Image: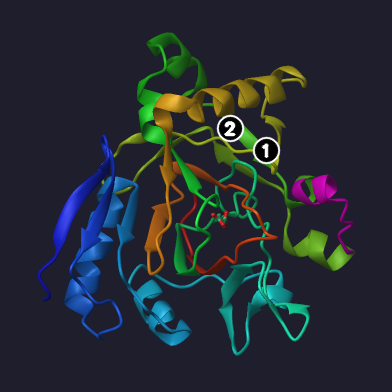
Amino acid sequence: MQSMTVKPMWDGFGVEITGIDLSKPDTETQDKVVELFHLHGAVVVRDQNLNPEQQMAFTERFGEPETNTRLEYTYPGEPRIYVISNKKVGGKDIGDYQAGLGWHTDSSYLEKPAMCTMLHALEVPAEGSDTLLADLCAAYRALPEETQSKIDNLKIHHSYQALMDMKGVTLSDKQKAELPDVVHPMVRTHPADGRKALWVSTGTTRGVIGMENPEGLELIQKMVTHATSEPFVHAHKWRKGDVLIWDNRCTLHRGTPFDVSKYVRLVHRSWVKGDRPV
Ligand code: SIN
């Protein structure tokens, strides 16, 4: 196993790893990173240069990779890698540069949402484009006990259709049948150590089961506002070569804008399938 330096990234959330090369087929080192990931909410491994095949080999150490629904922006020949970029080749966009600009947790519209998300930065703007991560366990712990017991057993109605409505996209009957609405807990327990996360999101949420709207949606919004308030949000400032992996079971995330007329951003994203939230 390669020796690595591990440092806390932020107070009580995330770790930074240096001194290793993830392109080597060294599963022992890679599995140590996976172990740290399960406990810390997010991990950044600095100074990497992974081709798509190497990124997918590392992704597979976390579990089974998830596929993408929008194939037009996936890497040619590797549909499990989604290209986040404003770069053009031959006058044509090679990626989607606006992926994930609102607070969300990935694929919360699925019965088994993505467990983790990995971004590998190949080109980064000199300013802007931070990825923000909200620590949902810290957000849950900071709630008054009375609020915790009020929400502990609540369930949220999530819907892919709701997300597409926001984007003005009409789903075909086939898509509707493939992606039915799902119900997930508002408070999610992490399988690694039982810690609880305030597992709310925006975009896919239609309301709270057993509550009328607007009260249900207002409660979700109130919890999102709390979870994404300053004490719980951490900004990842990108360096070329970073591999950032966050745990969707206990975080919300969002991208931030940058000056697309001045800078190029090129990031390769891969996902790992998750379990049914409990
Ligand atoms: C995402 O939400 O998947 C991407 C976030 C980012 O581009 O920083």
Magenta stretch in the rendered image: 163-172
* CA–CA distance in space, label 1 to label 2: 7 Å
Q: Is residue 227 left or right of residue 161?
A: left
Asked if residue 201 is among those painted magenta in the image, a careful observer would answer no
Q: Is mark 1 within 8 Å of ligand 1?
A: no
Say which residue label 1 marks.
157
Image-quadrant location for residue 142: top left
Q: Is residue 94 left or right of residue 30?
A: right
Ligand 1, seen in the image, is in the quarter at: bottom right
Is residue 183 or residue 63 the one in the foreground? 63
Residue at x 59%, y 38% (from the top left corner):
201
Q: Is residue 180 left or right of residue 3?
A: right
Residue at x 65%, y 38% (from the top left corner):
202
Label 2: how many Cα within 10 Å (few below 14, some 14–19, many 20+): some
Q: Are marks 1 and 2 in contact (CB under 8 Å)?
A: yes
Q: Tag 1's secondary structure?
A: strand
Is residue 119 or residue 27 the one in the foreground? 119
What's the amino acid at mark 2? Lys
What's the amino acid at mark 1? His
- The percent coordinates of residue 160 (x first, y second) are 73, 52
